[in-house]
Image: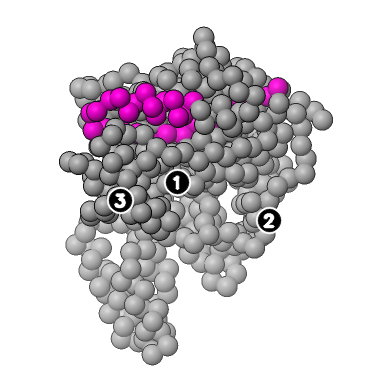
Amino acid sequence: KRRAPASDLWRLLGNMLIQDSAQRLDVNTALRRAQSLLVTKTAVATSEEEADLRQLDAPIIARPGQSEPFPEKLRITLQAPAGLLLEEQDNNVVVIGTKANSPAQALGAPRVGDIVRALEWKNNAVIITNDVELATSSAAKIPHGALFEILVETGKQWNTKQKFIDKSIATMCLAGGYRRRGSTRAACEDALALAASPKSIYRLHDPDYPKRERTEEKIKQVLKSKKIAAVVADGHGGSTASRHCAQRLPELIFAQKSPSMDESLRSAWARCVEEYLEVENGVGAVCAAIYIDLDVQRGVALHCGDCRVVGLDSNGFVLFDTSDHRLDDPLEVEALLNRGGELYEGRVRAGNWLVAVPRALGCNTWRTNGIVPVADLTPFDTNSLSALIIASDGFFDAFSSQDAALYLHALRLFRPLLDTNDLAATLATRAANLYSTDDISVAVVLLDHSSK
């Protein structure tokens, strides 16, 4: 006898994740079926198979719609019919090509050799194991023109850090922004600001408490300028600090007189921090910001905490992304302890507060407990850059940097009428639909390039 195929477990899991409650397996039925499968597997297992069976005790998938179970995975957005050519190889469903003039060919993803793990659209999720017929029939059910997502394990051909030689001059920036309150939040603590000049600043930072309906808002118009500053801040313990960032940082950026963009952004942040230290209210914020000047074809990104900036090229590849300052980074923890900080239950103890990050804009109480507003700068050239995503951690709870880049690239390709505010709203809404319960703020900056 041989073990029952792993596809049985995947199919069981898929039936447990169906969104329609009438079709979804209830807990007791699912438990009985899982126990039956495990008994079958254990009864026929050989000594060589025992190590594999132990892995069944580990969680396979966290929640529907997330791609965490798959190593070296990508979440790719396509338009139906995608035009993928699939084949069973080594007990997997593998991409072997794309049809001419198809959405998959236009997007350039997925690529030959990628292993298909799941298809998702609206409230439907189909787990793919080694069944080509299931994959093709499921894809065929997706309405023509609809967007759907495919989860893949990447083949050897992928190189998401490659740099493309083709470069052109960026002539204009188009910027938009959106924020929404998290489903578990009593009030939105995120804040966002976009600026084209000292007199052209748009903000999403008004308090929304105590509203109980879902709160969401977009910047009212697309900013179009050769100079753009964007700020996204995520409040911790309240919105005072995040609102301060959105209110003051754009003004301070454009007030700087230094010829160095790096120095201008660094000085603006330092002044923003200095002003906030006068406030003693026990709340803080993490922040990410960018400043672009197309007259010099350069930009610089700043981040403090776990808000993030992602820059992508015209093919949907990540050119750069900022690294989060988090407590799961051993270097950040070591630096925190060296500053006299104290960890308690995985967080930083700061007076009566337990703070989730080692770096943040905060009051003096936070500073004296090792939480510092030290920001990192990432300079970049704009001649290879197609777009930027600046977002709070609520967005990146659902998306990796590369997933986000590919999603934005697909939206621009398959939904060309969406402006930057609509793109930001679509990105944030998708993150919420992927079960991110935190506040989500997203700013999108597109760079318009002339021919060489």
Q: CA distance from mark 2 to mark 1?
A: 36 Å
What x and y, as percent, mark residue 414?
Answer: 60, 34
Foreground mark, 3 or 1, reads 3
Helix or strand or loop: what does disc 1 sit on? loop
What x and y, as percent, mark residue 64?
Answer: 36, 51
User: What residue is pinned by disc 1?
Assistant: 324
Question: Is 23 in the magenta?
Answer: no
Decide if residue 409 is in sight here. Answer: no
Helix or strand or loop: what does disc 2 sit on? strand
Q: Which mark is drawn over residue 340? A: 3
User: What residue is pinned by disc 2?
Assistant: 97
Of the image marks 2 and 1, the number of the one nearer the N terminus: 2
Identity of the residue drawn at 38% across and 81% down: 51
Looking at the rendering, the stretch of residues picked out in magenta corresponds to 268-295
Q: CA distance from mark 3 to mark 2?
A: 56 Å
Q: Amino acid at mark 3?
A: Gly
Asked which quadrant contains residue 81, the reply is top right
